[in-house]
Image: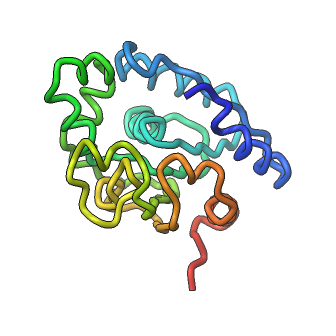
Amino acid sequence: MTGLDSELLRVRLRRAGFTPSMFRYQSTHAPLAEITDALAETLRKAGPRVHVVGHSLGGVIALDTFLNHADLPPGRLVLMGAPVRGARAAQALARHPFGQAILGPLALEELATPRERNWSLPRDVGLIAGSRSIGLGRFLADLPEPNDGTVAVDETDLPGASDRVVHDVSHFGMLFSTPVTDSLLHFLAHGSFGQA
C-alpha cells in the first residue's frame, strides 16, 4: 500500500489528539525478522508510550514484532483485518506460479501458511474484522461467511486478545469507515471496544 489509503485514518487520529506516523516496509521481498526488527527499533525511539495499529499483513507484522521483542514501550495494539491465522485467498493464489510472484516471499510465508498464534502478553490487543464480502479474495478462494471480501473473520481470530469487533465493512473499506475509526479510538482510550 502507498500510505495514501490510510491517510484519512491518520487525519482522524490526529483530530483525536494522536500523533500518527507510518512505518514503511518492503512488503514483498524483505524477510519477516528484518521487518520486525526495524519496527521494534522504530517503536523504541517513538516515546515512552506507543499505540500501534496494523491493517492486513501490517497487522501480522505488528503482532509478530510484539511477540518477538519483549522490551518495547507500553501501549495498545489494534489489528484491522489482519489474517493472523493465515489467509485462504493467499493460499489459493500461492497454488499458481504467477500467484507466488505476486505475493512474494513474505506473504507466502506469513499468509499462505495456516498459523496458530495466541496472545498471552500483558498488552491490550484489539481485533477489528469486516463482514462486507466485497473484494478479490472471494474470487480466489471459497471464503466462509462472514468475510470482508479478502479475509474471513475466523482468520483474524487471536486467542487471548482483549476484545474484538466485526463491522459491516470490506477489507479495504475499513480504512475509511467512521464506525471502524470510532471503535479504534475507543479501544486506544479504554482497552475495549465498548460494545453493548
Name which residue lies at 46% across and 66% down.
164
Front residue of this view, candidates 108 and 194: 108
Location of residue 164 with respect to 30 vertically, above or below: below
Name which residue lies at 61% across and 61% down.
180
The quadrant of the image that shows the N terminus is top right
Location of residue 168 with respect to 14 vertically, above or below: below
Front residue of this view, candidates 59 and 37: 59
Where residue 113 sits: x, y (%)?
A: 19, 36
Front residue of this view, candidates 176 and 85: 176
Visual colour scheme: rainbow
Where residue 173 sits: x, y (%)?
A: 56, 51
Where residue 62 sits: x, y (%)?
A: 47, 37
Location of residue 22 with respect to 38 vertically, above or below: below
Where residue 122 sits: x, y (%)?
A: 47, 55
Q: Residue 184: which quarter of the image? A: bottom right
Name which residue lies at 57% across and 53% down.
174
Residue that sits furthest to the bottom in the current view:
196
